[in-house]
Amino acid sequence: MSEKTILVTGGAGYIGSVCTELLLTLGYRVIVIDNLQTGYLNAVHPKAQFVKGNIGNKSLLARLFKSNSIQAVIHFAAETLVTTANTNPQSYLRNNLVRSINLLDAMLEYGCHQIVFSSTAAVYGEPVDVPIKETHSTNPLNAYGDTKLMFEKILFYYAKAYGLKSIIFRYFNAAGCTDLYGEAHDPETHLLPLILRVPLKQADNINVYGNDYDTRDGTCVRDYVHVSDIANAHVLALEKMQQVKSSIYNLGNETGFTVQEVIATCEKVTKCTIPVVNKPRRVGDPARLIASSEKVRRELNWVPIYTDLEAIVESSWVWHSRYRSGYG
């Protein structure tokens, strides 16, 4: 394929780093912009051009677009910590909306009309129908989901008024690692790396928030999708951008696992007992989040490779065992 230049915002983060790795493998030229507030320089592939900064810097964006023929943008950069979303909404509004609008305006000014946007299943809130289709009603429970949904609507208006083409992915629970890149948040909030801290001797137990949900074992059910499969969906979006309309797609495996089932799988993979401490429910945690991904499979020909929870856990265990301190 000819060398296309892709701008990846938030490319030093978990999903951004894996997507960058795949793009480079396929022959794309990749520019990563990240302020390293939550990302890591060591997570940026050495073959990518790295620019430290944030998308709120209009002059920086102007220089980037002016000096590079950028064909498309993959937009990961965002404030994502759900636990602070309602206590500090200003930060979410600034980062997820105001700065993202700056990005769109720079794209239009310099003739870049294609964007793939990283949204979230959090836009659905507490679902009525499971598995969840893209047509399901939206009712975010916090400022994180709200700002993601607001930006989806902004993309709709920019498409209608200015011809901007967008593909929006609503991720369910991203999980797993590649050989080089993995999940290392600070603070860590994702279930799988938190569980694996116990066999790594970095924690004594795993807290389970709520064991009285109306599920098969009382704990929350989530749909886990491997980060490599998410990255592959973004590549398919770039390849098929001209053939499909601007659209929204769920990314999930269409299979739900309870928290207890994930813990049991981690015990099997690591051959360690993982003690559980039961805690009260957290406000805003839906009992079940399971995707219907029929639309993305049909329209983008997306076929996830990692459909088995044990394989997802295994990939995480290999990475976390090798990089015990993450990117530190």
Image (tube, rainbow, N blue to C red):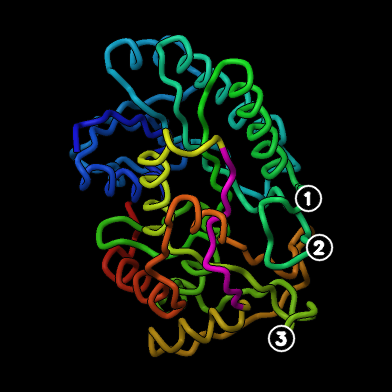
Q: What is the x, y in percent for residue 128?
A: 81, 62
Q: Amino acid at mark 1?
A: Ser
Q: Which mark is residue 137?
A: 1
Whole-number angstrom distance, CA of label 1 to CA of label 2: 8 Å
In this view, 144 is above or below 108:
below
Q: Secondary structure at mark 1?
A: loop
Total tally of numbered discs in the picture: 3
In the rendered image, residue 26 lying in the magenta stretch gets the answer: no
Q: Depth check: 153 or 303 in front?
A: 303
Q: Amino acid at mark 3?
A: Arg
Whole-number angstrom distance, CA of label 3 to CA of label 2: 18 Å
Q: What is the x, y in percent for residue 140?
A: 76, 47
Q: Is 76 positioned to the left or the right of 129 in the image?
A: left
Q: Nearer the viewer, mark 3 or mark 2?
A: 2
Q: Secondary structure at mark 3?
A: loop
Which residue shows up at 54% across the image and 79% down it?
262
Mark 2 sits on what residue? 128
Which residue shows up at 70% across the image and 78% down it?
219
Mark 3 sits on what residue? 216
Residue numbers of the magenta segment:
247-257
Q: Is 236 positioned to the left or the right of 44 in the image?
A: right
Q: Residues within 10 Å of mark 1 (few under 14, many from 20)?
A: some
Whole-number angstrom distance, CA of label 1 to CA of label 3: 25 Å
Q: Are marks 1 and 2 in contact (CB under 8 Å)?
A: yes
Q: Depth check: 217 or 89 in front?
A: 217
Q: Nearer the viewer, mark 1 or mark 3?
A: 1
Choose the circle earlier in sequence order: 1 or 2: 2
Q: Amino acid at mark 2?
A: Val
Q: Are marks 3 and 2 in contact (CB under 8 Å)?
A: no
Which residue shows up at 75% across the image and 70% down it?
287
